[in-house]
Image: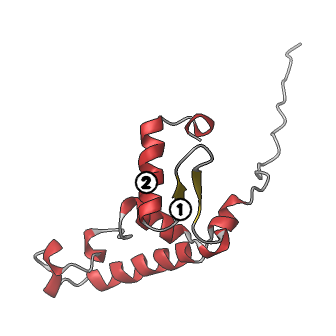
Amino acid sequence: LAKQCQLPVPMVSKILKALTQAGLLLSQRGAYGGYSLARLANEISVVDIIEALEGPIAITECSSDDPQVCVYHQQCSVSNHWNRINEAIRGALQNISLQEMSQLRPARRPPPSIATITIAQ
């Protein structure tokens, strides 16, 4: 997997361990061991994966549920707006499954522009 992704083995091992601890992967030791999904791919959301690797999604510290993160939390006039933005992003990511992410689609690229050359006579 590390070779295919062109990533260092320790990094891939750390990612696999975090996904296993979060209950997204199952680990099997031994000669025929390896990793497999703990749930169906359509039951694992992008939020599940991000939170397993990075922790709770919070676009700013204002989005944290911990009031001790900011001394101005109680009187802040923008934290509610940041919370709404954070929840919108989290909701969008929650609605995308691993199965959807794994379905490759051809890239849509604009057609190449036609170059014109003017030759002076």
Q: CA distance from mark 1 to mark 2?
A: 9 Å
**In the displayed structure image, the side of residue 115 where residue 48 appears, left or right:** left
Q: Which of the 4 image quadrants contains residue 58?
A: bottom left
**Circle on res. 25:** 1
The quarter of the picture where the N terminus appears is top right
Q: Mark 1 or mark 2: which comes first in sequence?
A: 2
Residue displayed at 47% across by 75% down: 90
Instruction: Count neighbours of disc 1 (C-alpha within 10 A) and say few if under 14, some if 14 to 19, many if 20 or more.
Output: some
Residue displayed at 45% across by 45% down: 13
Q: Which of the 4 image quadrants contains residue 6?
A: top right
Residue nearest the viewer, comparing 85 with 67:
67
The residue under label 2 is which amino acid type?
Lys
The residue under label 1 is which amino acid type?
Leu
Provide the secondary structure element on which disc 2 rests.
helix
Question: Which residue, as the protein is rendered here, is positioned at the far right?
Answer: 121
Colour convention:
secondary structure
